[in-house]
Structures are given as structure tokens and as C-alpha cells.
Image: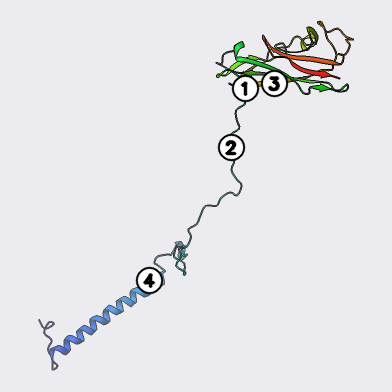
Amino acid sequence: MSVLRPVGPLPARAYWLRRGLLVVLAVVTLLLASWAWGAVTGSGEGSGPDGAVSPSTSPNTDGSPTPSPTQSVDPSPSPSASSSASPAPSVSSSGSGVAACAAGDISVVATPDKTTYTARQDPRFTVKVTNTSKQPCKRNVGQKAMELRVSQGDTLIWSSDHCAPGGSAKIVTLKAGASYSTSVVWSRSTSKRTCPTGQPDAAAGTYALTGRNLTVTSKPAAFALA
């Protein structure tokens, strides 16, 4: 009870003030000792193993956030697919599941590259086979299935079959409205079956060119030899 009620010549208030000051000094002393111990051991946020300081992310002085590390990117471009697709060919050698073209679905056109040829010009003829139907179909356009003819009136002057009658089949798939074309240069020499040698050249005059694919024949196209 003497601790709670100090005894002495001074008033009790003086003794309570002294005790309060002692308590404050003791607390301050403990806080200073604790801070000194933490500084010596180097403990605290941001320290790494063996006392090394670990990097930490903090905002820049201008207020913008410090950028975080980013993964490096290989500067070489990676291959990519092309943005534009090539159009599918109208003629294809494949045609699994596609029916053969009927004769009524095929048109044949034969054209000379000029209407008149001088004495030193050899005509070039083109025959074009077109699928006129609305569905794809397969057609033989091999050498044996194709023919070009030059006639004068009712007389056959030259045929591409006379000297090249054979050849293997060449089956192509024609899309609806698609065409297949091939060209031949005529040396002006007349021809006969079995391709005998020493045939004379065609004389100057007007001739008719026709083309054939299997059983389908083109309309005649006129041209002149000078």
C-alpha cells in the first residue's frame, strides 16, 4: 500500500510526477535499444540473403510506375500464313468422284492467230475445249482425243492426226465454264494418212480451220495464205 500512497515531506502529486517521468524514460530507452539492434543485424524489408539488398519495384520520382521486366522478343519474324489465298485452278488433273463430261456439255473452238499470213509466216492454231455445264466434269484432252484440220472446200489439206495419231489419254477436271487450250504451229505442209514424206506446201488461198475433241467439232474459222 506504501507504493500506491507515497510517504515523504513533499506532496503526493510530486511523487506521482517523478514516477511518470521514470516510466517515460524507461520506454524511450527500450525503443532506442530495439532500433539500434535492428540496424546492427540489417533486418527489414528489402534485404536479401547474406545482407544483399533485393531489388524492389517502386514508383519513379515523376509519378509514373517503374516498368516491370519484360521477356525479350526474337527480332526475326515468324513465318505466317499469307493473307491472300490463290484462286483454285479451273483445270485439274484430279477428279475423284467427278463424272465424265457429256458431249452436250462440251464446246470446241478453233482459232488461227491471224486472218492472213504472208509467205514467210507459219500459222499458229489454238483449240479450246470448254465445259458449258453448271457442274464440274472430267474430259480427255490428250493428243489422240484432239485434232486440228485445214480444209479447202471439201478437200482435207492437213490434219494433226496424220503424223501424230496416238498418244496416251490426258484426263482433266473442268469446272463449270472452265476451258482447256492447246496450240499447234502449222508448217504449211500438206499431209496424208500414214504421214508420207515429201508432201508439198499448201498453195496461196483461203482455208478453213476446224478443231475436234473426241466427237465434238468446232465451227470452221477462215484464214488466208499469201
| Dot in front, 2 or 1 | 1
Query: Do the CB atoms of the residues marked 4 and 3 lie less than 8 Å apart?
Result: no
Instruction: Report if residue 101 is visible in the image.
Output: no
Amino acid tagged 3: Ser
Tell me the quadrant of the picture where the C terminus can be found. top right
Q: Where in the figure is residue 34, as x and y percent of width and height?
A: 33, 73
Amino acid tagged 4: Gly
First-in-chain label (4 vs 3): 4
First-in-chain label (1 vs 4): 4
Q: CA distance from mark 2 to mark 4?
A: 68 Å
Using residue 205 as the reference point, say whether residue 3 is left or right of it: left
Query: Do the CB atoms of the residues marked 1 and 3 lie less than 8 Å apart?
Result: no
Q: CA distance from mark 3 to mark 2?
A: 28 Å
Outermost residue on the left side: it is 1
Query: Do the CB atoms of the residues marked 3 and 2 lie less than 8 Å apart?
Result: no
> Residue at position x 81%, y 22% from top?
116
Q: Circle 4 sits in a helix, a strand or a loop, which is it? A: helix
> Residue at position x 40%, y 72% from top?
39
Report the residue marked by disc 3: 181
Report the residue marked by disc 2: 84
Report the residue marked by disc 4: 38
Report the residue marked by disc 1: 178
Q: Where in the figure is residue 73, as x and y percent of width and height?
A: 56, 50
- Report the front residue among 2 and 174: 174
Q: Where in the figure is residue 55, as x and y percent of width and height?
A: 47, 62
Q: Where in the figure is residue 149, as x and y percent of width and height?
A: 76, 12
Q: Circle 1 sits in a helix, a strand or a loop, which is it? A: loop
Q: CA distance from mark 1 to mark 3?
A: 10 Å
Quadrant hosting residue 131: top right
First-in-chain label (2 vs 1): 2
- Report the front residue among 223 and 103: 223
Amino acid tagged 2: Ser
